[in-house]
Image (cartoon, rainbow, N blue to C red):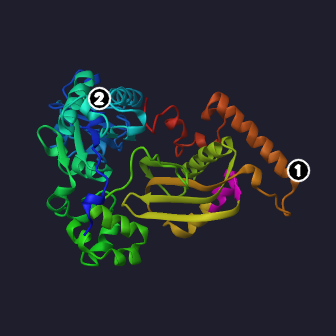
Amino acid sequence: MYNYYLCTRRDILCVDQKSFFASVSCILNGLDPLTTKLAVVGDTKRKGAVVLAATPELKTLGIKTGSRLFEIPNRRDIYIINPSMKMYLDYSQSITEIALQFVPPEDFHQYSVDEFFMDITDSYHLFAPTPKAFALRLKTEIYEATKIQCAIGIGENLLLSKVALDLEAKERPDGVTEWRYEDVEEKLWSIKPLSKFWGINEKSAVKLNQRGIFSIGDLAKYPSKYLKRDFGIVGVDWHLHANGIDASQIRDKHVAHSPSIAKSQILLRDYGFDEIYVVLFEQIDELVHRLRVSHRFTRTIHFSVGTKDGVIYRKQFSIQAGTNNENEIMKHVWTHLKRLAAPDVLYRTISVSLTNFIPDSLRQGSLFEDPDTVLKEESLRDTIDALKIKYGQLSVMRAFSKTNASTLQLREGLIAGHKR
């Protein structure tokens, strides 16, 4: 067992704006988020469009994030609208500004558009007698300014505040709960299945189940040396987290040691194998454009495609010398994909990521390359990049981006893949 008296005790808030995207959409249309049945979908004109958000009332009908437009009942009391990403970001910024009235920026961390952490240890007493009273005040001020309801988890550390939010606060009438080290055995250890716990996915849960670990209590009592042996440092983290321990602090800002440039899409219809060539190439084009603008080469490429039945084909490979040439990357991707994937099934998801970067000044030429040809190709790519920077992505397109398989023109001007 761990000695909690040796652990740092902070007052951390994890704040979630409940049904944020659907709630903002309701407010913009003069509707009540608590009583309205409303779905935000990727594109109201496409039956296969994905439901991005749904109000609590609509969820009672079985419609949730990830459902398809054609699954929503055709009823007059159900509103179906396109997303308004710019407005969502504006609302999120407004809520962030409210939070920053109570804590300095170094004690604030934006976890996602609709969720953030605050370390109020050194400041809550200026506004309220207890952390919970402060949370209730913050919740009220956000609602009065934006009409957005919040749920808030309070914990001794980032982990406990997040788990308290996800597993209890969202279900409480006042939307606020508080978990301390003293609550770990009662509240944390009873969690099962393991995949409900932050940081453990379903695949990891299966591996833990094979070792007789079915609840967080089982994980907390399992010898950490065996978790380290079988899972490495991740196993040690699981053991600490299962005991409610998390030493990370908001002020210790995370620096990514292995940054990546990535892009993924959920296709709006079923694609044949040959059609995904177009979308893959368009994704690689966009990523490599960003790579060149940042004056870097990539040495590691990862891609995946998913079928309509949920089967995922994925592969990671390396180009040791590094590259910022989309044609070279696509050639490798397509060669691998033809070996991996089934050619006679339909596809719905595509993802590409580039990582393991080096400065473009470090790449060495090959003895097998013609210097004049290389210089001409680089000059052409520089010209294309300059045109895209000045006039936008659609200023220079490949011919296949005019075909029905292309998604490039559909995505132009979107924020996070959705309409402004």
The dominant secondary structure in magenta is helix
Q: Residues within 10 Å of mark 2 (few under 14, many from 20)?
A: many
Whether residue 202 is visible, yes or no, is no
Image location (x, y in percent) of residue 410: 49, 36
Image location (x, y in percent) of residue 208: 30, 73
- Is 43 drawn above or below residue 6 in the view shown? above
Q: Nearer the viewer, residue 174 or 171?
A: 174
Image location (x, y in percent) of residue 65: 29, 45
Front of the two marks 2 and 1: 2
Q: Residues within 10 Å of mark 1 (few under 14, many from 20)?
A: few
Residue beneath the point at 18% across and 38% down = 132
Taking 342 as reference, is 236 left or right? left
Q: Nearer the viewer, residue 271 or 95?
A: 95
Distance from label 2 to label 1 (Cα)? Answer: 56 Å
Sequence-first tag of 2 and 1 = 2
Q: Amino acid at mark 1?
A: Asp
Instruction: Please state the total of marks drawn on the protein image.
Output: 2
Disc sitting over residue 166 in the figure: none
Taking 145 as reference, is 323 left or right? right
Disc sitting over residue 24 in the figure: 2
- Is 74 drawn above or below residue 337 in the view shown? above
- Is 179 drawn above or below residue 141 in the view shown? below
- In the picture, the quarter occupied by the C terminus is top left
In reply to whether residue 150 is colored magenta, the answer given is no
Extreme-front residue of the structure: 5
Which element is circle 1 on?
Answer: helix
User: Which residues are drawn in magenta?
Assistant: 322-332
Which element is circle 2 on?
Answer: helix
Taking 145 as reference, is 365 left or right? right
Image location (x, y in percent) of residue 144: 22, 22
- In the picture, the quarter occupied by the N terminus is bottom left
Residue identified by numbered label 1: 372
